[in-house]
Image: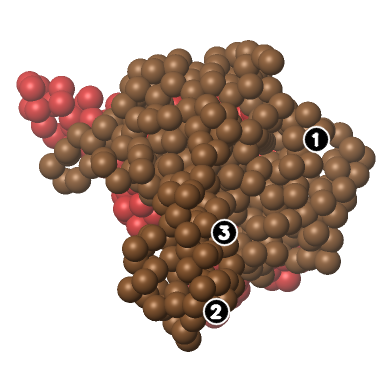
Amino acid sequence: MSTILSIDGLRKTFSTGFIPRRQEILKGISVSVAAGEIFGYLGPNGAGKTTTIKCVLGLIFPDAGRIELCGRTHLDPRSKTQVGFLPENPYFYDYLTAREFLDFYGHLFGIGPDERRSRAGKLLKLVDMERAADLPLRKFSRGMLQRIGLAQALINEPSLVILDEPLGGLDPLGRKDIRDVILRLREEGKTVFLSSHILQDIEMICDRVAILVGGRILSQGRLTDLISEKILFTEIVVSGVGEKDLAAHGEPLSAQAGRTLLKVYEEARIQAVLDLVRDRKGKVHSLLPRTQTLEDLFVDMVRPQ
Amino acid sequence: MTVAVIALNTFKEAVRDRILYLLLFFAATSILFSRVLALLTVGDRMKIIKDVGLASISLFGALMAILIGTGLVYKEIEKRTIFTLLSKPIRRSEFLLGKYFGLVLTLAVMLACMGVIFLALVFLQTGAVELKLLEAIYFIFIELILLTAVALLFSCFSTPILSSLFSLAFYVIGHFSWSLETLIKKVHPGLGKTLLRGLAAVLPDLETFNIKTEVVHNLPLPASLLLTATAYGLVYAAFVLTLAVLVFRRRDFV
């Protein structure tokens, strides 16, 4: 598959404070995003996710490194005709109505008036904002701004959509809606580059991820390659058996209302626990094998830093 | 094309801003107040009406240019709307010029509104439409074109309050810089005189755009003045805008 975004050896230092102190935010980032995939750019707060995105879009100038966007150098305005962008905590012109807002951005791409009107109508429907089409943006809630921001990012029918924390500040229903839109974009053959720290959402939709910590990429690849599918442990909730007896087979984590949550690491012990429960005429309430999640991987990588 | 789209949006932003109407209201009040002042004056009452009216248009036009102009770029950065805008296929210079022409368009409309109120007041007093007054308003417009460029330049790297102070200082210095010429005449030749000459060359001379006396007293205007004042204003504005583009070109938007 062809590469739509490639970042090579990106470095950026900022000087902050009254007596300027240099702080290196990006320490040589290299990322490559293939056309047609959903790429997750993960990292804790302050890792440099937004800084990377701003470098890609030409909002800040890197100290070193090369960025290629849709086959052109990123500072060439033509490269941006194929890009849509939703910033983190979107702030927009609050004196415009939603429809005027979409029309303005469509106009910047040189789209004709009829086409702009038709696209704005479709996008308002896609993000479920038709009812607020003629309200000024200053009356919008955080979630509504996020939705209209996503519509704005799609007005030019881009090949690459860059979303900075698109699920931040949304309620569960809103998150699901945005996730659905992102998946639909992939079905339409578009590439999505999204940064986030809400790992469950990323895990559900991303093809590949890069994990960024302290300005360095610690890991990059297909989710299935990064996360082992091996069972790490099994969680068993039982009642009618004493905690002390269970401790011989695993790690009792909590006991509430007569039920004990037991963490069993060895597979052979699971059968022993079940036998014990049967002998004591106890009850097994649930048995859940746990594989590694993106969150486990993330925590493992971030913690030593 | 892109410049025009941004300019129209800036115009929309300005005309939906309450501060513009507040200033327009005070400008109209001030123009109409000239009628009251005329009643209290001995002598040519029409002179007072025209003088105060034109001075009001000039002052409130300058306030509009400064108060809106200094917030134009700063607000985009502060409210982070610039992130989305510059992620589109537009150059930073196009963004700046769009903002600039949007405000110039707004000021043109506002000057037209103030001009109509002023001409109507004069018409009520004299029964004649004095088109010569339009010449004075045209000169004020050229001055505002320059002042807007200055406000925009400061807005590229400073907060609105500081930018307003800087732009106001430019306006005041520009209207008094002619007195440097008087000083130069009185200073003995030497380093001091050379320095003063240099300063006089660099500082703006906004009195070039002040033809109120000629218009009010119906004095003949030199034919070349229209051309030289227009050229002076436009070239100076172009120079300031180039500086603004240079400042803005390599700026990081964190």
Residue B184 showing in the rendered view: yes
Query: Three-letter amino acid code at disc 1?
Result: Glu
Secondary structure state at the residue bearing disc 1: helix
Rendered residue at 45%/55% (across/down): A269
Chain letter for the red part: B
Quadrant where the C terminus of chain A is found in the figure? top left
Residue B179 figure quarter: top left
Rendered residue at 40%/36% (across/down): A212
Q: CA distance from mark 2 to mark 1?
A: 52 Å
Of the two numbered discs 1 and 3 in the rendering, the one whose residue sits closer to the viewer: 3
Residue B221 figure quarter: top right
Mark 2 or mark 3, earlier in chain: 2
Secondary structure state at the residue bearing disc 3: strand
The vertical placement of A2 against B156, above or below, is above
Residue A106 rendering spot, x and y as whole percentages = 76, 39
Quadrant where the N terminus of chain A is found in the figure? top right
Rendered residue at 57%/76% (across/down): A283
The reply to whether label 1 and label 3 mark residues of one chain is yes
Mark 1 or mark 3, earlier in chain: 1
Left or right of A59, for residue A62: left
Residue under numbered circle 2: A281
Residue under numbered circle 1: A187
Nearest the viewer among A196 and B179 is: A196
Nearest the viewer among B81 and B224 is: B81
Of the two numbered discs 2 and 1 in the rendering, the one whose residue sits closer to the viewer: 2
